[in-house]
Amino acid sequence: MPTTETGHHRTVRALYDFISEHLYLNRPDLEVGGEKFNSTLLWSLLTALLGGKALVTGEPGLGKTTSAEYVCALLYRIPLGVLWGSEVAGHPEQTEEKMVGRPDLGKLNRGEEQVVWSNFVQLPVKIIDEINRLPETKQSLILDGVDRGNWEYLNQILLQDEYCLFATANYQDQGTQTLIPPLLDRFDVMLESKHPGANLSFFISQQEKKDNLLRDPECERGFYAVLLDKATPQGKGVKLEEIGGRFAGLLHERHTLTTLEKEERRTLRAAIAGLEFSAEASAFMRTALTELSFCCTYGQKRSNEECPEGCHYSGYLCYQVRNCASNRLPISLRRYAQALAWLLSSSQVEVEHVRCVLPFVIAHRVQWRDAYVSAREREARRDPLPLHLAKQAVAEIWHRFAEQREQIMSALAQAARILAGEDLRPLEGDHPLFVEIKRDLGGEQLW
Amino acid sequence: MVNPFREFHTHQRQGREIPLDRILATKDLILERLVAGYHTLIEEEVHNLVWLVNHGALPRAYAAAEKALAEVNFTVEDVEDFCFTLEKADSFALALAGPSGLYLSAMCNRVEGTEVLLRLKGLKSRVHLVGYRLPEGKRLIVEGSCGDFTGAAMEGGEILVQGNTGNWTGVGLRRGKIIVEGNTGEQTGEWMEGGEVHVKGRIGNLGQVRGGKVYLGDRQVAGR
């Protein structure tokens, strides 16, 4: 059910169009709501809009970092030159002092402790280049900041109310490290910046200095002057917003582009968060979450336990998965499905939106059984293996949901009535969701 | 406690109709009407449960069965399904061997199609009057055994009984053929006027055979 398009819709759509036509040229690879999008650009834009976290993978030089930079420059009104100076590069020698903050050495000599926060921490846009070149110990340093926007150094803390994170990762080579599962789980979506194809690639070679579209030396100097000021970060936000406003004016002059100020972004996030799920979308999401967390024998998935052979549910994904879906997964899924529904001017989140987002939300989180990976890794595909596996998995879940939709919806409705006090029995069915419902109703007792 | 299902509280189950549901519903409706017709027959004839000895009662009951079936459009498969209904029925009315056989015969005689399979193997009691007035061109195959009066007043066609039959097999037979793979009871071929009765097992005894032929195995034992 579509709603009326608002000014914010037009603004965000115009930003997507501008980037896709002038800055990040790539093929559309995602169709939703009758429209075609490039998935990397779409999810990057929604990540910046929502204040989410995206892990962007891809071959070197295919626009992982630059796509994030373009999106963030426009969504947060920050010139590219400033973003470049605030990015953290992943390498083994990286230190907390370079990433988060350092003591003010002058003041330290006088016996005072004062933290000089890094540009990375101070700006709402955080880009970590080649995160998988950070050793595992260094990855832990940014866990909390990445998760909650709380940055700590020398007993001082910087709290951020608005931020988004983009981390790029190359494919495994000699210099890369494994990303630790807790860090991976903190990313909302995983994307791949793909090769645009020979023809677009040829076209890109003809574009010169396209970065200048999003640069302005004067504004950049203004930003740096504020960021490098050793004063406490309180009060800097207003100044940064003011300079960002000037940059926004320039963008409007040069490209007739409207951008969003901080308060508008906040209002827009509230509108997105207010979108309700249709009953069907909710049921599908529950079906998917069940398959990624359920175990009939051991109660739930645990990464240190393996499914016993001959399980009744071996036809479901729970049998193919090694780890359990975290509570961050449904949060990511909900937020991105809401954002997609909002972008498509839908009055509520429909099952199609959930289905579209789901692969990108689970690709980096799910650990598959080796047998499942072996069976699928040689299949013809257009995505990296984790995303391909996720898309296939979602197709399987969708197929099962379509078959059992009415029974699942009825079972959920029956459960609602039982918990409301009606004297009814839970409905029976084959999907593990029926068992989950019984567990919620207290109908399953092992001892 | 939080009700994690509350958003579904107002969800109403939507019956999604598939073609098979419609076919099954139609089949059920036909069977219901066949059973209802049978009950009508029982109600009309229940006052005369000993009607078998009364010559006038049989044609009257058959006419009532034909009337009960006149409005129902049924197929050979429905006749077979009716046999299953008889098999599973607990009701006294359905278990009545005489009326149920007469009704089955009326169904077989009226249904379109030349060959009808009657599965009577699992019935608690033997069905009498199977093949009553069977017309020319029809073939009945009976899995299991029949009760008395099998093929009574047959007017043509063929009955193959893959079991035994009771007394009065082929009584009043005019035309057609009865093949019994097992044994027949007393008065086999009583008042036969034509046609043939073939018994591969044993014959209890022969009735007064006026016409037609009765065979025991390959040997003719009665008739001209």
Image (cartoon, coloured by chain):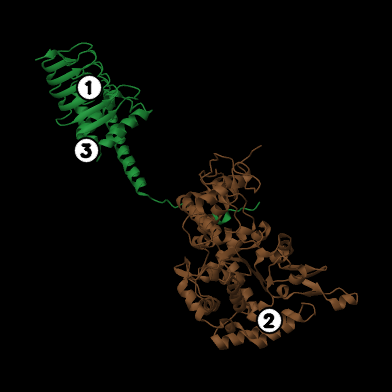
B6 or A330, which is in the foreground? A330
Do discs 1 and 2 share a chain?
no
Q: Are marks 1 and 3 in contact (CB under 8 Å)?
A: no
Q: Which chain is brown in the rendering?
A: A
Q: Quadrant of residue A238?
A: bottom right
Q: Residue furthest top?
A: B205
Do discs 1 and 3 share a chain?
yes
A140 or A402, which is in the foreground? A140
Q: Which residue is found at the position 54% from the left and 62% from the top?
A: A357
Identify the secondary structure beneath mark 1: loop
Instruction: Name which residue type carries label 3.
Output: Ala
Name the chain under label 1: B
Q: Residue furthest front?
A: A174
Find residue B150 and name its label.
1
Instruction: Name which residue type carries label 1.
Output: Thr
Instruction: Name which residue type carries label 2.
Output: Glu
- Looking at the rendered image, the quarter that the C terminus of chain B falls into is top left
Q: Quadrant of residue B65?
A: top left
Q: Upstream in the sequence, badge 1 or badge 3? A: 3
Label 1 – label 2 distance at C-alpha: 101 Å
Q: Which chain is green in the rendering?
A: B
A116 or A349, which is in the foreground? A116
Which residue is label 2 attached to?
A: A241
Count the marks: how many?
Answer: 3
Do discs 3 and 2 share a chain?
no
Label 3 – label 2 distance at C-alpha: 89 Å
Find residue B70 and name its label.
3
Q: Position of residue A323 (x, y in %)?
A: 62, 51
